[in-house]
């Protein structure tokens, strides 16, 4: 945890309210996100219990599984979920704008510009918590290899038509959520924790209700009290006033409300099956649907507070202006969305269970680049984030006091102005450390030459000690040599060199990230990594049937 | 000397076996584990020269530019006539200017310019950008345990066969983003290159160097037991071969007493009163700086097997190690304030592979309220405790043993991942138990 976050948390404890960690919103929020509040069945991995889903905060669509252990009902739920989610994705997939992408021409080996489609906006998916993201990933994994009757007429338990497709999309969203700074699939708790610091532990910050209580407590109550109530307060029947944001449910709800309701439903089903004539069957069918309605209303009651909390969280985040560079990251999300759309349309097989060596290395490299990029961009977009980096010695703000023109020694001398910057901050500068500033949105590089006092010949120890260890407010003067972005001529382009009096933020980290080297294609995987992966049939073989499968 | 074999002979036997497998073996790869200071660089240079002499085009992959430059200089010392290429990046100042003074070293940012030279050296990062060239017959991968699996993936297409050399006890490579998703896969991109290599090619011959020439007889048993329990090694020198003495007697202060203890026994623990502190604990930082200053002020002199006369311990023969960069910055500032210059102060990551006469390190767990995986990492402590030829002084707050007992390792066990022994918790306890015999308590 950085020093400034620690400070913000201490202040939050002190004041009883969450403290801002950002002055702008660092995640892109679309105008029409799809919110998904899923619930899972206790003790049965990957058995969905219900969900609220939709784009209209006043009209969520309720999906429920009356008996989660019944595979047919589970498939019916998944089919319904596909119906609720896929149209949202497809509407975004169909609205495109022309774009250019550079591709390597397979014949000439040159990079050329190609006209391609880019989805004008990607379909954003919001879940309440990080566990919700894991559940999206789990649902994706459980659906994408299913076979429909159309895929394979002989499959014994065909999945409903659109279920495998939903599995592929959810898998894509789950993978994309692992890319730092991406906004395609967001957890509300992550979104809020990025922008506010509470006075509770980071474990407690995963509780959406408690988190909202700190950020936006009811009038007259402190965040700590409100959070305590959100976590623990129960009604007369022993039920939590603020049910967990899921997908796991509260055991008191499971035991006292849900289990009896599911038992009633099971009994009604058995009774219906045993009905001997039409009249009894009709009556018992009524019993059954009454039992089902009961379960649905129970689930709706525990999911609705979470649903409302997600929208409240979105409102809070939308209250911040959007950071300038988050749009740039959203464009990458759109590219990723478009690329997946194209893979699906091209009839490519579902994502494999495990990445091969090359894919894994590529993903890791891309995510490391994205991590460095989001850290730099957030600091450039937001003075409060930059303040944290300044406090850590990774950036500094200073006033230019002097500019001296010098030139490189060559036949065509280039400008290398020496800029003296006065600052009371303590950046971790070493000999020839590179520093960057933003000039018209592009980074300009300078290198650290030394402390002005040392260069003037004063006792070195004194001034360095001042810079690094002096009391707050002790100023030092740094000399930087600007090395680029001054045009091609002997004299620097107008406006490209700082002038005395300018206050400039310099960073020790780069503003843009260079991508890593190209990796070999999967079919050229070297011997050190096991050689090329096996054929398609090896990768896509279904799990073998074991004795445990047939009880 | 009845049961102990001659260290030089043991080391020579190991080296011969390695060179035999490399030059005449049939396996595509040979792996060499080397404990700290066991002559890894010497081995790399010798293997490179023998491969070049056998007429095999050779590429050398190291991890940092400093390592590459160091190898180039060593090669040029041993074989000034050998044409050597240094492939470098296109950044400004990409290599040590000393290379420009070497006649047979050609430097270039393009691999094509260096084609045909006997040996071409570069970093893994630069090699990864080399495309469309004829593969080399042989490669030497230096510091292979510090290389990440994905970095090896990017360069492995450039060579047919390779010698992998490294120290398994040092810091593992790391990733700035989570990579749990691939944990347990044989080609986990965040694992070390050797882990992946051996997972796919378990039949490759593996050797190890049995003698540490750097670590004194006082340090080798501890480092070997604590960090290499299943692959023990010995010191190349015996007790009494190395001595550290001071021209100025002790003034009775904590720093002086701990220096005397370290000179006598090879280890010293300067223990400050227990306290939870910020990372840049001002008292501990100042204590580190004072120890360094007194070491230099008192005219430390080192006698070793290299010569009969004591050699003064100058600032360039002293290093300070820390866990974090801000701690290193704070120590640097404190040293400057005391008027000490020229001493290397850096984090464990950056001290890897380096050697000094005397080291002083701030214990990674000193003053902490918790013991995280980062601070418990075996490799971090191993690097800090194995950089010295004569003596090592540790500065630490009291209470680390209790802290360890309150924070047993709780890292999740991942299926398919080989559990590393010893874990950091155990290694920390082993080192602490030994250090407590050389404890000097001091209240600044």
Image (cartoon, rainbow, N blue to C red):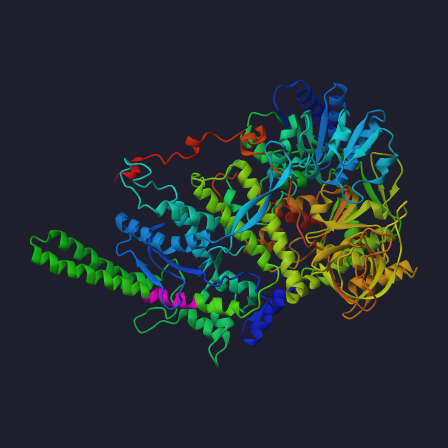
Q: Is residue B370 visible?
A: no
Q: Which quadrant is the C terminus of chain A positioned in?
A: top left
Where does the N terminus of chain A fall, quadrant-wise? Answer: bottom right
Q: In which quarter of the image is residue B87?
A: top right
Q: Which of B301 and B3 lies nearest the eye of the viewer?
A: B301
Q: In which quarter of the image is residue A391?
A: bottom right
Looking at the picture, how far across and down is residue A150, in whole percent? Answer: 31, 39
- Reply above or below: B20 against A153: above
State the image coordinates of residue B129 (x, y, percent, origin top left).
Answer: 68, 37
Residue in the foreground of this view, choosing between A277 and A395: A277
Residue A455 seen: yes
In the rendered structure, the answer to whether residue B89 lies left or right of residue A134 reads right
Q: Is the magenta stretch mostly helix, strand or loop?
A: helix
Q: Which residue is drawn at 63% across and 55% down?
A: B400
Report the side of B31 relative to B259 (left or right). left
* Number of marks in picture: 0
Query: Is-magenta flag for residue A307?
Result: yes
Q: Specify start and end residues of the magenta stretch as a single range.
A: A301-309
Question: Where residue B397 appears, x then y in whole percent?
Answer: 68, 58
Of residue A32 and residue B134, the one placed in the foreground of this image is A32
Q: Is residue B296 magenta?
A: no
Estimate the x, y position of residue A51 in percent, counting from the top left.
35, 59
């Amino acid at each position: 945890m950085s020093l400034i976050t620690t400070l913000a948390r201490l202040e939050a404890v002190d004041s009883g309210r969450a403290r801002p960690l950002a002055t702008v919103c660092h995640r892109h929020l679309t105008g029409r996100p799809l919110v998904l509040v899923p619930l899972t069945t206790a003790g049965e991995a990957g058995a969905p219990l219900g969900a609220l889903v939709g784009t209209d905060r006043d009209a969520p669509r309720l999906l429920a599984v009356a008996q989660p252990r019944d595979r047919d009902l589970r498939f019916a739920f998944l089919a319904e979920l596909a119906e609720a989610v896929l149209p949202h994705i497809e509407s975004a997939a169909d609205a495109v704008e022309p774009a250019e992408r550079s591709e390597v021409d397979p014949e000439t080996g040159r990079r050329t510009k190609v006209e391609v489609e880019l989805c004008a906006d990607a379909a954003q998916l919001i879940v309440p918590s990080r566990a919700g993201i894991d559940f999206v990933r789990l649902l994706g994994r459980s659906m994408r290899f299913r076979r429909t009757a159309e895929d394979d007429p002989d499959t014994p338990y065909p999945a409903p038509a659109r279920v495998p497709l939903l599995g592929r999309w959810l898998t894509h969203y789950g993978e994309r959520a692992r890319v730092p700074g991406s906004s395609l699939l967001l957890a509300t708790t992550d979104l809020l924790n990025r922008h506010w610091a509470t006075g509770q532990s980071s474990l407690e910050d995963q509780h959406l209700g408690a988190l909202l209580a700190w950020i936006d407590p009811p009038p007259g109550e402190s965040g700590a009290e409100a959070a305590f109530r959100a976590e623990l307060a129960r009604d007369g029947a022993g039920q939590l006033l603020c049910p967990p944001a899921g997908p796991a449910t509260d055991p008191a709800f499971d035991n006292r409300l849900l289990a009896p309701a599911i038992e009633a439903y099971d009994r009604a089903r058995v009774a219906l099956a045993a009905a001997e004539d039409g009249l009894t069957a009709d009556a018992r069918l009524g019993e059954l649907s009454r039992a089902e309605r009961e379960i649905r209303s129970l689930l709706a009651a525990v999911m609705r507070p979470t649903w409302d909390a997600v929208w409240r969280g979105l409102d809070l985040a939308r209250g911040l202006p959007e950071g300038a560079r988050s749009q740039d990251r959203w464009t990458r999300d759109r590219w990723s969305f478009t690329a997946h759309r194209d893979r699906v349309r091209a009839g490519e097989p579902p994502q494999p269970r495990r990445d091969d060596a090359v894919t894994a290395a590529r993903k890791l490299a891309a995510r490391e680049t994205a991590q460095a990029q989001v850290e730099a961009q957030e600091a450039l977009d937001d003075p409060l984030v930059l303040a944290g980096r300044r406090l850590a010695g990774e950036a500094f703000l200073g006033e230019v006091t002097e500019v001296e023109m010098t030139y490189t020694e060559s036949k065509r001398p280039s400008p290398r102005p020496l800029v003296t910057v006065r600052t009371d901050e303590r950046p971790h500068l070493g000999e020839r450390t590179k520093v960057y500033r933003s000039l018209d949105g592009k980074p300009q590089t300078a290198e650290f030459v030394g402390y002005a006092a040392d260069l003037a010949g004063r006792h070195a120890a004194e001034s360095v000690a001042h810079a690094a260890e002096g009391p707050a407010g002790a100023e030092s003067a740094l000399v930087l040599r600007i090395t680029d972005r001054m045009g091609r001529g002997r004299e620097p382009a107008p406006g490209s060199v700082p002038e005395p009096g300018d206050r400039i933020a310099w960073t020790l980290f780069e503003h843009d990230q260079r991508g890593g080297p190209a990796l070999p294609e999967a079919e050229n995987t070297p011997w050190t990594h096991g050689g090329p992966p096996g054929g398609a049939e090896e990768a896509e073989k279904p799990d073998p049937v074991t004795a445990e499968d047939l009880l | 000397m009845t049961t102990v074999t001659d260290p030089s002979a043991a080391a020579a036997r190991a080296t011969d076996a390695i060179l035999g497998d490399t030059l005449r073996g049939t396996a595509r790869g040979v792996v060499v584990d080397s404990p700290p200071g066991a002559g890894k660089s010497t081995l790399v240079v010798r293997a490179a020269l023998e491969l070049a002499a056998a007429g095999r085009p050779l590429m050398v992959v190291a991890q940092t530019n400093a390592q590459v430059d160091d190898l180039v200089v060593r090669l040029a010392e041993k074989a000034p006539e050998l044409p050597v290429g240094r492939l470098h990046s296109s950044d400004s100042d990409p290599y040590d200017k000393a290379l420009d003074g070497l006649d047979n070293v050609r430097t270039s940012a393009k691999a094509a310019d260096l084609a045909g030279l006997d040996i071409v050296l570069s970093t893994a990062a630069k090699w990864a950008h080399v495309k469309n060239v004829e593969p080399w017959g042989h490669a030497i991968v230096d510091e292979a345990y510090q290389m990440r699996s994905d970095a090896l993936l990017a360069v492995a297409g450039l060579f047919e066969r390779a010698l992998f050399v490294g120290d398994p006890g040092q810091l593992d490579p790391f990733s700035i983003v989570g990579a749990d998703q691939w944990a347990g896969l044989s080609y986990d991109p965040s694992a070390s290159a050797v882990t992946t290599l051996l997972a796919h090619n378990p039949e490759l011959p593996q050797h190890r160097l049995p003698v540490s020439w750097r670590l004194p007889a006082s340090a080798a048993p501890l480092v070997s037991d604590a960090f290499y329990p299943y692959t023990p090694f010995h010191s190349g020198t015996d007790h009494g071969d190395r001595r550290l003495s001071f021209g100025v007697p002790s003034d009775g202060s904590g720093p002086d007493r701990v220096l005397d203890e370290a000179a006598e026994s090879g280890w010293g623990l300067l223990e400050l009163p227990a306290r939870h502190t910020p990372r840049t604990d001002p008292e501990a930082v100042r204590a580190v700086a004072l120890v360094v200053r007194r070491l230099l002020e008192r005219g430390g002199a080192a006698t070793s097997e290299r010569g009969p006369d004591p050699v003064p311990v100058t600032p360039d023969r002293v290093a300070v190690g820390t866990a974090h960069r801000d701690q290193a910055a704070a120590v640097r500032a404190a040293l400057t304030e005391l008027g000490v210059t020229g001493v290397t102060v850096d984090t464990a990551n950056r001290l890897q592979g380096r050697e000094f006469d005397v080291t002083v390190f701030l214990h990674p767990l000193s003053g902490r309220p918790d013991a995280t995986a980062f601070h418990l990492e075996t490799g971090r402590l191993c690097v800090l405790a194995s950089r010295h030829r004569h003596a090592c002084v540790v500065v630490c707050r009291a209470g680390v043993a209790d802290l360890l007992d309150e924070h047993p390792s709780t890292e999740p066990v991942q299926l398919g991942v080989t559990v590393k022994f010893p874990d950091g918790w155990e290694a920390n306890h082993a080192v602490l138990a030994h250090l407590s015999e050389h404890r000097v308590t001091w209240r600044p």
